[in-house]
Image (spheres, grey):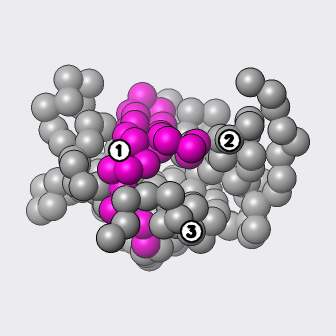
């Protein structure tokens, strides 16, 4: 796979050096935007800029958040919308499971994220896949870019 030069994100969130970039031919990677208040707790959980990212290629969506991962075909994505802000106590720390709607959150800031909805619920929180999630929220640096990319490639009516 040939590498492609990284391009800076459309905007920088929270003053960090966060990017979305063409990672390799056909793969776009979106880095998470780490707010200072979230960084220390995230590091203790092995969530770092090296282990927290979203990748989209021609057929697949993948999100990694330290030890937690979500992988699904793009055809399984039904919607992507920008949401936020979020309460610190609801988002800081490990991957979050919402009891009310079974949604999963990978958050490194409380400002903005992308809520991704799936046609078929996905694995993500537990390694056995017993819990399934109908949606995932990710707080990447380029929320508008990720939402736009997924809307253009997902399974939309």
Find numbered disc 2 in the image and state the secondary structure of the residue it sits on. Answer: loop
* Residue, far front: 157
Q: Taking 85 as reference, is 12 above or below it?
A: above
Q: Taking 15 as reference, is 55 above or below it?
A: above
| Residue 106 seen anywhere in this rendered image of the structure | yes
Mark 3 in CB contact with mark 1 (< 8 angstroms): no
- At 47% from the left and 73% from the top, the residue drawn is 82
Dot 2 alpha-carbon crowd within 10 angstroms: few under 14, some 14 to 19, many 20 or more:
some
Magenta residues span 56-81
Residue 56 got which mark?
A: none
**Residue 100 x %, y %:** 12, 62
Find numbered disc 3 in the image and state the secondary structure of the residue it sits on. Answer: helix
- The residue under label 1 is 95
Q: Nearer the viewer, residue 74 or 83?
A: 74
Magenta stretch mostly in which secondary structure?
A: strand
**Residue 146 x %, y %:** 57, 61
Residue 148 got which mark?
A: 3
- Nearer the observer: mark 2 or 1; the answer is 2
Q: Taking 77 as reference, is 156 above or below it?
A: below
- The residue under label 2 is 26
Q: Is residue 68 magenta?
A: yes
Find numbered disc 1 in the image and state the secondary structure of the residue it sits on. Answer: loop
Q: CA distance from mark 2 to mark 3?
A: 16 Å
């Amino acid at each position: 796979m040939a590498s492609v030069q990284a391009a800076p994100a459309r905007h920088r969130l929270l003053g960090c050096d966060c990017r979305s970039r063409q990672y390799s031919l056909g793969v776009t990677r979106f880095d998470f935007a780490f707010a200072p208040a979230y960084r220390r707790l995230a590091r203790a959980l092995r969530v770092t800029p090296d282990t927290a990212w979203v990748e989209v290629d021609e057929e697949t969506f993948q999100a990694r958040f330290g030890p937690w991962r979500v992988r699904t075909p793009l055809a399984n994505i039904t919607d992507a919308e920008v949401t936020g802000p979020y309460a610190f106590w609801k988002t800081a720390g490990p991957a979050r499971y919402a009891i009310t709607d079974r949604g999963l959150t990978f958050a490194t800031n409380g400002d903005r994220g992308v809520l991704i909805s799936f046609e078929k619920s996905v694995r993500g929180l537990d390694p056995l896949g017993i819990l399934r999630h109908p949606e995932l929220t990710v707080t990447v640096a380029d929320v508008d870019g990720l939402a736009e990319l997924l809307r253009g490639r997902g399974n939309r009516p």
